[in-house]
């Protein structure tokens, strides 16, 4: 109660400080709630996807009158497009899936809201969705608001003969068929978010709890001299910080509630969710409402320890004791763990993140980060004492003596920025490992589309889609069945030698303008395809059919295709000039080729979907669900880095503003003695820049070691990220520039002697 009375009765400055502490804590709690809710958002998506999954039995043994179901999952651009065909049975009442009131009858459609909008924008999709729209699928039957999902009512005769058709037993599985993020990847994602957000968040909340530490310490020392007990003095200080943190926690939860409503409706790139998915759970509320005040309690008690133990020294501004060295023990322990894992990367049997090693890697990274924060004041004190005893510069001497007396003052300013660089190094490691896991083995990506479904205009437009680097056409021969009952076939690749070279890994002996036999040394040769064998091909010149017979020549081209490849089974290469003018193959495929980078693949698939939304696209060797998963993880990692950046910069701004207010009396006194404003600005900048430089060097070294230990145990091919060093070095220089500019406004032109009236 005494702490609260002092809080609200100590003047406007005390109340402003209290609300600043609460506002800073609210920002931290909002970020904490967002990090804790991300797994719940992903789990809610997977739970709804699992609940609607049909459980089927073999259609061959289906009972008479039972309900049949056929599921088709195709890409629409880079997004999955799912259609569930349902042939309603005559026996029994089948329970409908979540989101539907009843199973669709023949000719009825149930569409997701996003697919309903897409059908109006792209009427050609109607060919894939026969029937009339009956109703929309409710949120309980959709993973997210942007999902493309449809239930199509049909008859048994239309789907009974399909090999993928099954007898419907019920809906719902205990696991999602295609989770938003794989469980193993989700573990890495949690580790990344914890490092990127929670470490800087702890520092930020500590900075908010230590606002106006010097003035509060003098006030507490006065209370102690008036007879308050040691524990009572600590509790008075802790009461103020706890109340501010508790108010900030409630405000932060309210801010998150508003943020959830806004973000769920606007969405993030590749990630949408319903507002209920991001609702605060009791666990998240408990962690925020208990964790933030608990941290403030310990920080408040620790901040009052000096005033309670030696109040006379505080009131008379005696030289405080040097910072403790125990923080270095955490740093040495953390560096020992991560260095040990890095050392295994130099052996033939590097460590893996299995079992206890997974906990050791995480523990080593967190210990290194915590030790880095706790060791900086001691290192700053040693440097300040050494430099102050040897320098002849007035500005440098003043700066170092101040850091020697109050090493924690500058540390509060630079700690958030130091952790920002440390977390950035770890973020590089997470992105590198994820890229190794998700990046395709091939440097190129092929897309195959049936030629009969494409007009000449569409074919021309598809070859001009952004990201497409090469294209070709294949045509398949036709002939009567042979003795084995299987007609011999030869796939011809209609392309130039230059196009063939871009479609495969390597070619040898290709002559431009000639029909040549294609030989793949990595696969067995077809005995039906030999020099002299003839194969007829059907083409179409406008509406007029044309037939062309090609004889397999003896001249060969040795090609080494990628695995997999859309042109790997081609037997002969035919230059476009060898075909009749304006003639197009009647059967075959249009093959497009692009880089295999997931961003490029998504761009090409979206371009194809915009031109031909109903065409069947086969992205050779690529799962569209995996593409969606990659996009979601990249979005969450970018979100974590943005939150870490916001928290780090907020910690710097809060600390530098608080330090400016606390140092006004000292700056005024030195100004009245005769120091020039230029000298004082140099002093203020040096006080921050030198400790910051030490911290950034340590952050770069320890961050790279932590990153390497993470990469080594991840099992990828990249262990040492030398390419990321220049990026981090530039970031460190940028941090120094920002910190220098941030300290300049601390010295103003106006002198207020009232600030030192009591002194």
Image (cartoon, rainbow, N blue to C red):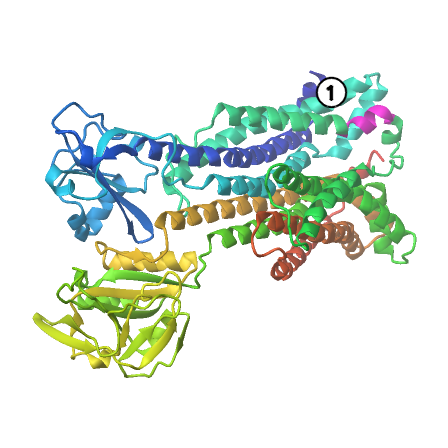
Counting other residues with Cα less than 10 Å from the Cα at mark 1, is it few (<14), some (14-19), or many (20 or more)? Answer: many
Q: Name the residue at the front extreme.
A: 483
What kind of element bears circle 1?
helix
Q: Nearer the viewer, residue 713 or 737?
A: 713
Work out whether residue 458 or residue 408 is closer to the camera in this orientation and state it. Answer: 458
648 with respect to 229 (left or right): left
Task: Note whether residue 752 is visible.
Answer: no
301 left or right of 103?
right
Residue shown at 24% from the left, 64% from the top? 589
Q: Residue at x 89, y 35 (%)?
A: 318
The reply to whether the magenta stretch includes residue 632 is no
Q: Could one spot residue 520 in this view of the protein? A: yes
Of all residues, the one furthest to the left in this rendering is: 544
Residue 436 point in image, percent of width and height: 51, 54
Magenta residue span: 303-311
Task: Please identify the quarter of the rendering in which residue 221 is found.
Answer: top right
How many marks can you see?
Answer: 1
User: Disc 1 marks which residue?
Assistant: 235
Most foreground residue, 422 or 176: 176
Answer with the quarter of the image where residue 478 lies.
bottom left
Q: Quadrant of residue 593?
A: bottom left
Q: Quadrant of the N terminus?
A: top right
Dominant secondary structure (helix, strand or loop) of the stretch shown in magenta = helix
Image: 657 above or below 303: below
Residue 674: x %, y % from top left: 85, 52
Q: Residue at x 42, y 70 (%)?
A: 505
The one of 10 and 578 positioned closer to us in this rendering: 578
Q: Position of residue 125 (x, y in %)?
A: 19, 50
Residue shown at the point (49%, 51%) measured from the top left = 437
Residue 305 is one of the magenta-drawn residues: yes
Q: Position of residue 342 (x, y in %)?
A: 68, 51
């Amino acid at each position: 109660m005494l702490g609260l009375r002092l809080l609200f009765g100590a003047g406007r400055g005390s109340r402003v400080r209290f609300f600043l502490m609460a506002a800073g804590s609210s920002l931290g709690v909002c970020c904490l709630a967002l990090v804790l809710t991300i797994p719940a958002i992903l789990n809610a998506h997977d739970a709804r996807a699992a609940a609607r999954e049909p459980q089927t039995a073999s259609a061959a043994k289906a009972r008479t009158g039972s309900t049949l179901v056929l599921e088709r999952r195709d890409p629409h651009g880079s997004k999955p497009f799912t259609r569930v065909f349902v042939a309603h049975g005559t026996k029994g009442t089948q329970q409908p899936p979540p989101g539907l009131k009843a199973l669709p009858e023949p000719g009825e459609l149930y569409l997701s809201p996003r697919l309903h909008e897409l059908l109006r924008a792209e009427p050609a999709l109607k060919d894939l969705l026969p029937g009339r729209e009956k109703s929309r699928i409710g949120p309980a039957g959709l993973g997210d608001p942007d999902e493309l999902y449809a239930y199509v009512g049909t008859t048994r005769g239309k789907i009974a003969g399909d090999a993928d058709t099954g007898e419907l037993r019920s809906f719902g599985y205990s696991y999602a068929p295609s989770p938003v993020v794989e469980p193993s990847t989700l573990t890495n994602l949690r580790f990344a978010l914890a490092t990127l957000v929670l470490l800087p968040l702890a520092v930020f909340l500590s900075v908010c709890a230590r606002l106006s530490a010097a003035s509060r310490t003098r006030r507490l020392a006065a209370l102690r001299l008036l007879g308050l007990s040691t524990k009572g003095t600590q509790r008075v200080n802790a009461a103020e910080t706890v109340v501010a943190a508790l108010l900030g926690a409630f405000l932060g939860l309210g801010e998150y509630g508003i943020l959830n409503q806004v973000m769920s409706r606007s969405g993030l790139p590749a990630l949408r969710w319903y507002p209920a998915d991001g609702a605060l759970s009791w666990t998240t509320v408990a962690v925020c409402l208990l964790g933030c005040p608990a941290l403030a309690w310990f920080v408040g008690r620790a901040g009052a320890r000096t005033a309670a133990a030696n109040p006379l020294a505080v009131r008379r501004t005696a030289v405080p004791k040097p910072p403790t060295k125990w923080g270095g023990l955490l740093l040495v322990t953390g560096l020992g763990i991560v260095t040990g894992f890095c050392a295994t990367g130099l052996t033939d049997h590097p460590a893996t993140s299995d079992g206890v090693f997974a906990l050791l890697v995480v523990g080593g990274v967190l210990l290194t980060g915590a030790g880095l924060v706790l060791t900086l004041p001691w290192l700053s004190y040693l440097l300040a004492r050494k430099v102050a005893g040897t320098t002849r510069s007035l500005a440098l001497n003043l700066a170092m003596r101040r850091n020697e007396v109050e090493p924690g003052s500058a540390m509060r300013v630079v700690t958030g920025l130091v952790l920002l660089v440390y977390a950035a190094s770890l973020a590089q490691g997470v992105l590198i490992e994820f890229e190794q896991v998700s990046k395709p083995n091939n440097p190129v990506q092929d897309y195959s589309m049936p030629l009969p479904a494409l007009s000449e205009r569409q074919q021309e437009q598809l070859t001009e889609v952004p990201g497409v680097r090469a294209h070709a056409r294949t045509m398949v021969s036709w002939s009567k069945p042979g003795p084995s009952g299987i007609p011999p076939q030869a796939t011809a690749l209609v392309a130039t030698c230059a196009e063939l070279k871009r479609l495969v890994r390597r070619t040898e002996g290709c002559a431009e303008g000639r029909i040549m036999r294609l030989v793949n040394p990595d696969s067995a040769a077809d005995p039906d395809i030999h020099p002299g064998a003839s194969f007829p091909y059907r083409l179409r010149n406008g509406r007029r059919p044309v037939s062309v017979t090609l004889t397999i020549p003896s001249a060969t081209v040795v090609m080494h295709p990628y695995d997999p490849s859309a042109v790997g089974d081609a037997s002969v290469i035919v230059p476009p000039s060898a075909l009749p003018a304006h003639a197009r193959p009647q059967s075959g495929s249009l093959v497009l080729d692009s880089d295999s980078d997931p961003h490029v693949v998504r761009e090409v698939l979206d371009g194809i979907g915009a031109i031909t939304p109903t065409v069947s696209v086969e992205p050779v060797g690529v799962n569209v669900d995996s593409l969606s998963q990659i996009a979601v993880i990249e979005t969450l990692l970018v979100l974590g880095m943005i939150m870490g950046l916001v928290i780090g910069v907020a910690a710097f701004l809060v600390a530098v503003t608080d330090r400016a207010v606390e140092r006004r009396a000292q700056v005024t006194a030195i100004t009245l003695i005769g120091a020039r404003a230029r000298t004082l600005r140099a002093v203020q900048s040096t006080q921050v820049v030198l400790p910051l430089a030490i911290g950034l060097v340590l952050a770069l070294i320890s961050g790279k070691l932590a990153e390497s230990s993470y990469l080594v145990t991840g099992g990828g091919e990249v262990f040492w990220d030398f390419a990321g060093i220049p990026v981090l070095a530039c970031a460190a220089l940028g941090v120094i520039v920002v910190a220098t500019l941030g300290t300049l406004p601390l010295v103003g032109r106006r002198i207020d002697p009232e600030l030192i009236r009591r002194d």
